[in-house]
Image: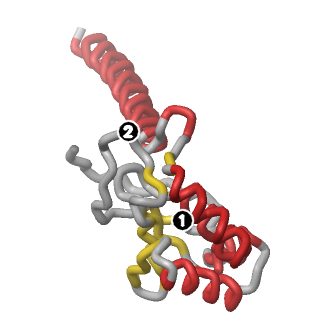
Amino acid sequence: MNNDYTIQLVEQNKKLNDLLQNTVAQLEEERRFNMLAKNRVTGGYYMMNRTAEKNLRALQKSNPTAALVFSVIRENMQIGTNAVTISNPALAKILEKSVRTIARATKHLADHAYVQIVKVGNTNTYVVNEQVAFAGSVGQRKAVFSATVVAHECEQEKGWDEVKKLKSVPIMY
């Protein structure tokens, strides 16, 4: 009788463990989905006013590379902060330009008040002038500092793409 009871408990324990593992997997999937959707705007839009549109056209005419860099920055800027952290080598790889060309282009953007450059170690955070382009709802324009970080594969160490399961740690929200 005692042996049957032990077997029954072991089976129940296995079922509960399987249920727990399934629940943890579902929660991890939900967290991953929420993080991906966290800074998304429906349709992925940002807005520009008419004066800014004229300024953008002038930028495209005077410095096409700076206009391309500005395009990548706007494409990746975080909602509500208008900021993105991205290295010059990553911008160079994305736009197929030299790092020096990117440095000149970002200097042009800063000198002409399209972006503010904030140094973060060896890389830059670009804060877009909220009068030029802003992401978010009308009436919600602001430039609070926080940024999206773009880490390009060209900057990673060998083996970066080999996915390793990380240790589970408690996360508080």
x 30%, y 11%: residue: 4
Q: Is residue 63 left or right of residue 148?
A: right
**Count of numbered tags:** 2
Alpha-carbon span between mark 2 and mark 1: 23 Å
x 56%, y 34%: residue: 43
Instruction: Answer with mark 2 or mark 1, whichever residue precedes in sequence.
Output: 2
With respect to residue 134, does 88 lie above or below?
A: below
Query: Label 2 belongs to which residue?
Result: 137
With respect to residue 169, does 68 lie above or below?
A: below
x 50%, y 32%: residue: 42
Query: Label 1 belongs to which residue?
Result: 150
Q: Which mark is residue 129?
A: none
Residue 130 makes an appearance in the image: yes
x 57%, y 65%: residue: 55
The kind of residue tagged 1 is Val
Q: Quadrant of residue 28?
A: top left
